[in-house]
Structure formats: C-alpha cells, structure tokens
Image: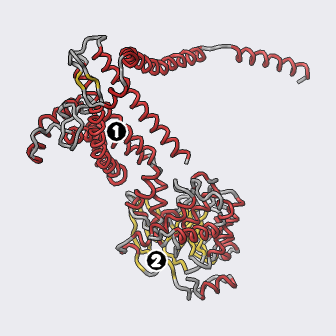
Amino acid sequence: MSTTTQALRNRATDARTAEDFDRRDPDWYVDKLLAGIVFVCGISAILFVLGIFFFVTKEGIGFVFEKMDFREFFLTPYWSPSDAEDPEYGILALMAGTASVTGLAMLVAVPFSLGAAIFIAEFASGKTREALKVLVELLAAIPSVVWGFIGLVIMNPLLIKWFDIPVGLCVLNAGIILGLMAAPIMTSIAEDALKAVPDRYREAAEAMGATRWQVIYKVVLPAAKNGLLGGVLLGVGRGFGETMAVLMATGHAVNIPNSIFDSVRALTATIAAELGEAVVGGEHYQVLFTIGIFLFLVTFIINLSADLIVRGIRKG
Amino acid sequence: MVSSSAAAVASDSVAPTDNFPHKLEIRNLTIRYGDTVALRGVNLAVREHEIFGIIGPANAGKTSLLKAINRMDVFTSGMKVDGEIRFNGRDTSRLKNVYALRSRIGVVFPLPVGLPMTVYDNVALSPRLRGINTKADLDVIVQRCLTRAALWDEVKDRLHALGSLLSGGQQQRLTIARALSQEPDLLMLDEFSIAVDPVTTMRIEDVLKELRQEVTILLVTNLVQQARRLADRTAFFLNGECVEVGVTEDLFTGEVKDQRTRDYVEGRFG
C-alpha cells in the first residue's frame, strides 16, 4: 500500500468521523426531550410548594403587619375569635396543646417503633419478617379519621373507666392515638436504617464474641443513628401536622394542660374546625392563616435542624 | 501466657513436634449447605503457638472451616456442621456459651472491616464488652494492640477519626489490632492480604511472625508463597477435602504424599 493511498484513506475516514460527530440522530433528540421533561417535573414540585407558601402568606400576612400584637398572639392563652366586641387571638394554649400531644405521642411511638424495627430487622427472618413488614405498611395507611374514631369511641370510655375521669378526650388519649399513628412509618424508616447497616459489621462484632444485644447496641444502632433520627423527626413532623385524629381525640378545649387528663386543642385542629365558619378575608380568617404560616415555619425549622444534625453526624 | 514450649519455637524456629499440646483438634468434620458439601471428613490438629497455614483454591472449604471453628455457623442459615471440633480440649458443639468461645478467637476477614466508630473505639470495643471501662486501662490496651499491629505510628494523632476512613491496608491492620484486643488464644486470618498492597502485606507478615510467640495462628491464604514464608505446618485443601497436612517446607521441597499438592504448590494446577 502506497503512502498516497494510505493518506487518502485516512482523509476519507476523517471525513466520515467528522460527519458522525456532527449529526444529531433521534436518540440525541429523545435524550434532550426527556431531560427537559424531567427538569420541568422536578422544578414544578418546588414551584407548587412555593406557590402554597405564597398563598398562605398572602392570606395571613395582612394581619401580621397591621393588627397583630406579637405578645398577645404568642404569650396569652385566650382564644375567642368569634367574640364580636373584643375578639382575642392568643395561641399559647393551642401551642401547648400541640406540643403536649406531640411530646406524649413521641414517648409512646419511639420505644414501640424502635423495638419493632429491631425485631423485624435483626431477629425476625423469612416469612415472619415479610409478614410483619406488610402489616406495618398497612398500619401506616390507616386514614387518620379512623384513628380519631378509635380515640373517640374506644379510647374515650376506656380511659374514663380506668382512670375515673369525667372526660376521656384528653392529652393522654390523643397522645396514644397519635403515637400509634406515627409508629408504623417510624418503624418502617428505622427498619430501613437498620437494614442499611452492612452485615459485615454484625459478623465482625459477632466473631469478636459480642452477644446479639451487644452487637445491636454497640454497633448497629450507632451505625444507623442518622436514619433513626430521621425517622423520629418525621414522626415529630407527623404529630405536629396531624389534624383530624387530634381534633377528635383531644376534646378540642382551649386549655393549657396541667395533667395528661386535661382536654386541649391543637393548632391544626383549630384551623380545620374554624376556617369554614370564618368570613373570607375577615380578621378571624386572616388569623387562621397566620397560624398556618407559624405551622409552616415550625415544620421548616424541624426539617432544617434535622438535616443539619444528620449532616453534623456524618461529618463527625 | 508465653509457655516454655512457645519460647523454644521462637528461639530456634524448629517446627513443633507431636509432643506439643493441641490448640485445636478437628475430627471427621463435614460441612453442608443444603445439599452442597463444602467440607468432607476433615481431620487435622493445630498445635499451640504454631502458625498453621491452609492453602487451596477457591471453593476448597477454607472459609467454611473457619466459620465452623468460631461457631459462626449459627448465623448462616442452612449451614450444617457434623463431626468434632475441639478447642483447648473442649468440644465446641457442646458449649453453653458460644460468645465466650468467640471472644477467645480473633478473626480477620478477607476484606477489612473497620467498624463505623473511631479508631480508638474499634480497638476498645472488645475490652469494653469484657467489662473494662477505665480510660487508663483502655488507653494502654489500645496503644499496645495498635503498636503490635504496626499501625500505632500512623494513627496515633487521629485516634478519634472514624475507623472506616482509614486506607484499606490501615483498616486491615486495625482489624488485626481489634482481634488482638480480644487477647485471643487463637488468631484466624482469612486471606487477609486480598485487599492490601504488597508493602503492607509484608509488614503484617512481620507482625504475625512476632505474634507467634503469644498466640496460635491459623492462616488461610490463597498465596502459596505466603504460607511458605509464615507457616510452620500447612494443610492443602481441595474441593472440600483436606488433601494433605505437613511441615510447610516439606510441601515445597517435594516431599509430598499426594501429587495434587505438588501440582498446586508448583503452580501447575487445572
């Protein structure tokens, strides 16, 4: 083969390559199109959230800037929005209601869900594990109004009978109901976190002579702490935002609780119960949206701090 | 713990004779996974304070043997162990407390397992499980074990960094330090050099030579030359069978009872 033919052939190859490199085939267009669609979907999720935030803010912000007295709003427990002469908007009692119910719910849910997750992830095997996992997912799907119904119809008379109290709709009732409600999803997340701990860690610790409990306590739980914390915070978020069950089981009485047998009222339940009767655009209506902004901010702070804590743990 | 017999081994490095007490005796050991036989009728004895090498290709049943010795079979579903394993003279299938057995056998796995905790906590874990909680005591143990595993100089300034952030070779030495922190009677290493660079491998090998004075070592390796460098006696496993047990040097100088051993050792296999 002469040098000239070789050179010619090279040039031809180069030309073909150049053509290939500049031609956009259908695959290229499909790729671009799909990238565009996925981008729009991703952005729209953010846009919807922002849109909701702006709507809530728009409805409530007028009150915040014009009439709201921050001290009265956050520091007084008097909530009588329908008083025509002198309506009072103090959410201290409502905050106490939400906090007490959520706190008690976590006391119920954390040990339950952690225990259940440890059993499912570390001890159960084969069919038992699969059955339990399906059951937990099913429990997580029970509508909250059903839980509220259980609180109202089953827990209420039981509590009256056991503790000899006049009304069974109280912090205890709602806390237990909310705890049981939050437990399945917390179990599910905690179980995922435990399963994500590689088996070689367990084997290494077992080979060392650690008992099953020592392996779980010293190795698995510390390794899974990010996910576990995430689960707990999700439960707190659930408790904070839950409305229907809390509305039905707390007794819905504006009150700063002195004991777990006192009736309370939650922030969310207040919005749900009163928004329908408030005049659109009126002061009462605006105050309810202000509570909405407050709830929004608190959930945002919970999630943000969860995120920061988890990052901090990762870095350490 | 260093007996006079061990000192003898160390000083003139003569292979132990049969008068030595047995650390581990294995009689007619068969291991099955369901219908698959992983190990068939194995008989061997490991003497105290020797490095006992086990060589053989993949699927020879080497790892299954280690699992059975450590009673880790309990956690592997479908694994069935028949026969007798005697550790310090006790039949391990009849122990009431397998955790006590495991705590006296240190295991180093093929891939390094730095537990997700600090370097310090990795080494202090086993002492803590035994109930040693004083910081001063733990400090001494941690430094001693890391030094013996030839890792102390590299990590002494970062004892409180995550163990899983160390390099592969360092993690493997951390694993060895952790095994040593158990103050084991028997140290079992399962192809420890798979994920370790040659320089680190040689450092660990030096460590093992020194450790021979204190513990009995069972060294499973896929590197024939590693067995030659380290082991006093070596067993050759093939397809679940223990083909031959002999003084290591004999296997390499051709004094073998079975042709398959010679073929494997000389790299003429398959």
Residue at 17%, 42% (x, y): give it. A261
Residue assigned mark 2: B87
The residue closer to the viewer here, A12 or B130, is B130
Q: Label 2 marks which chain's residue?
A: B
Residue A13 as seen in the image, left or right of residue B251 = right
Q: Position of residue B92 (x, y in %)?
A: 41, 74
Residue B222 visible? The answer is yes
The residue closer to the viewer here, A230 or A292, is A292
Residue assigned mark 1: A235
Above or below, B266 against A20 in this view is below
- The amino acid sitting under disc 2 is Phe
Residue at 64%, 68% (x, y): give it. B147
> In what element is the residue under mark 1?
helix
Mark 1 crowd level (few <14, some 14–19, many ≥20, 10 Å Cα): many
The quadrant the N terminus of chain A occupies is top right
- The amino acid sitting under disc 1 is Gly
